[in-house]
Amino acid sequence: MLVFRPAVDNISFVMFLAIAIVAMSSLFVSQSAIKENGRFTFINLLLLLIIGMNGVVLANDLFTLYIFLEVTAVASFILIAFEKGKNAFEGAFKYVVLSAVASALILASLAILLMVSGGLGFYEVKDALLSSSNSKIAILAVAVFVVGLFIKGGLVPFHGWLPDAYSSAPSPVSVVLAGIVTKATGVYTLVRLVISVFGFSEPVKLMLLLIGTISIVVGALAALGQSDFKRMLSYSSISQVGYIILGLGAGTELAIAGAVFHLFNHAIFKSLLFVNAAAVEEQTGTRNMDKLGGIASKMPVTGTTSVVAFLSTAGIPPLSGFWSKLIIIVAVWKAGFHGYAAIAILASLLTLAYFLSMQRRVFFGKLADGFAGLKEAGPWIIIPALILMLITVGLGLGFPWLFGTFLMPVGSIL
Amino acid sequence: MSIEMSQQIWAYGVFAVLLFVAAAYCILVSKNLIRILIGLELFTKAVTLLLVAAAFASGRTGLGQSVIITLIVVEVVVIAVAAGIVIGQYKHTQSISAKELQDLKG
Amino acid sequence: MTTIDLLLLFLMMSAAMWTVMTPGLLYSAIGLALTSAILSVIMFQLNAPLAAVFELSVCAGLITVVFVAAISLTKPMSKQQEAQHAKTRLKRYLALPVIVVVLGWMLWSAPLNFDFLPRGIASGDEVRQVLWNTRRFDLIGQIIVILTGVFGIVVLFKNRGKEEAEK
């Protein structure tokens, strides 16, 4: 007798789609980035990573969730250290330590929840938490769990591992790590648990709103001062994930729908940006933005797709990022949190600022020295870039039609 | 549950928190990578203690033991991979000092 | 029964403190094994025999072996560096016992707030039944973790053999 009811509803479908698209892009990039003799282990590890993330999405029980979180984490450690570069070991080690601390916090909270509710399934714990909602120990358990998930999702102030891990990993690993692993293990788990288990109690909402806003601002500010292309993209990731958490903290149906949509969009356009970073790194051999310049004249496809991705990140119509940010900000404003919404709008301007400066430095402007013989990246990197760009543009242009069918059912699971 | 049993569970809880503190101190203060791994192990011991106490208190010893066994399996895999990373770092830089991990700054 | 439990908890705490504060890495690893052994005895006391056996054999055995292997594969500092290091080291670590004792005393005398629903001792479900039947999906998860670990070891350790063969 198999007591296993997978949790498949609208949010899960969105996540499955996002995981599949990002993993496909990563596989394409790995064709040119990983050497022949390492390809067997790389592909197997990537498949195990996909198993882990799909298991997290399917989990209906805290125990199952924990195991598949660990599968994802272990596969990520190995993938980050795959090429055995020196910085790769440093990034991997920091990720190991912080991820193990986060897992320990999640398990400690799981123990207390076991004591409170006598079981570990989502519905049992939800009922127990509802009936003892003013107990200090239950609130402590929920807070510890949420902190553990913040560490896994890379939110400020627990983001110490994120820039090092993203920038020192090999290119296809960065694509899948930034695109979907942090989202699936940290942010999606938070969405699922707050909706199905913890409920929107006041302490939880306050934590989410605060940490979300702080992440938006700190991520945007830190991205301004970077000279390494991938590090700047990692700080931008932290900032965008802050938007998702802010939407989740507002708690209304529209806000959650916006948050999930932004999660999907972020997976797509961040993967696109990292695919472009892979193209730039492979063709020019450097990630230092001060040394690059005017590349778009030699690498037109990379330049165009990166422009589309930047505009989507900054929230410019008619791309998909604009719609999801608009929904989040409108929903937060309507829920009464005017201050947070204002900060979010201002940070959006900051996002635009650093991306414009980065675009000017790397892709446009005068061609830097030594890059006269630069060629466009190979087909294995062009194809995923084009696919991801088409998805971003398509979702953005077709959004008014998709609103009823794609978006509102997501929010209606509340 | 009876008062003395809740007193007993509180004792386990206090010691688990103290172990957490010791492990966190070890991770934060030590300069040797392998000692950081030992600190992670102590974290896991603290969580195991908490899980055993919770399983005893709620009566679900079967479920609790399954979680602990799973935790031990995962912990072995994580420590093996982490030790591999530390050894790889050593082969690169000939040292296991945590100071070497300061390269990626900013 | 309660005094034995308290004694075991104190022993475990002291073993953990010794693990953190002792300067030698090998002593630290042995301290970890000792902590695992005492934890295993505590688990026997709390009606968790299968997990206790697992903990004793795996954590006090296998993980200690992994640590000792890692320590022996990475060369420690030389003798003078070690003596110099030990002096500054004590200053850094001295805060730990103080923090632990103070925190322990504070928590012990704090008022109990067990205001959640009290659970009686329900009929404990049989471990093997839970592990193999009810939780079969999680068992698949464990197998996948072990498989991932195997791949990890292969990736991290394989090329080294080739490099050393070339030298």
Image (cartoon, rainbow, N blue to C red):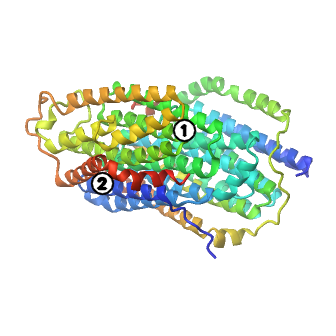
Q: CA distance from mark 1 to mark 2?
A: 31 Å
- Which residue is depicted at the point 88% across and 50% down? B5
Type of amino acid at the residue the image marks with label 1: Gly
Observer-nearest of A366 and A411: A411
Left or right: where A312 falls relative to C148: left
- Which residue is depicted at the point 59% across and 47% down? A194
Residue furthest to the left: A372
Image-quadrant location for residue A350: top left
Instruction: Name the chain letter of the residue that bears numbered label 1.
Output: A
Q: How far across and down, in percent of the image, does residue A110 sit?
A: 67, 50
- Which residue is depicted at the point 12% across and 35% down? A371
Q: Secondary structure at mark 2?
A: helix
Observer-nearest of A182 and A403: A403
Check residue A25 in the rendering and tell me which mark sits there, or answer none. Answer: 2
Vertical placement of residue A218 versus A317, above or below? above
Q: Residues within 10 Å of mark 2 (few under 14, many from 20)?
A: many
Check residue A402 in the rendering and tell me which mark sits there, or answer none. Answer: none
Type of amino acid at the residue the image marks with label 2: Ser
Image-quadrant location for residue A313: top left
Left or right: where A52 falls relative to A121: left
Vertical placement of residue A186 versus A340, above or below? below
Image-quadrant location for residue A120: bottom right
> What residue would you read off at disc 1?
A249
- Which residue is depicted at the point 85% across and 60% down? C121
Q: Nearer the viewer, mark 1 or mark 2?
A: 1
Q: Secondary structure at mark 1?
A: helix
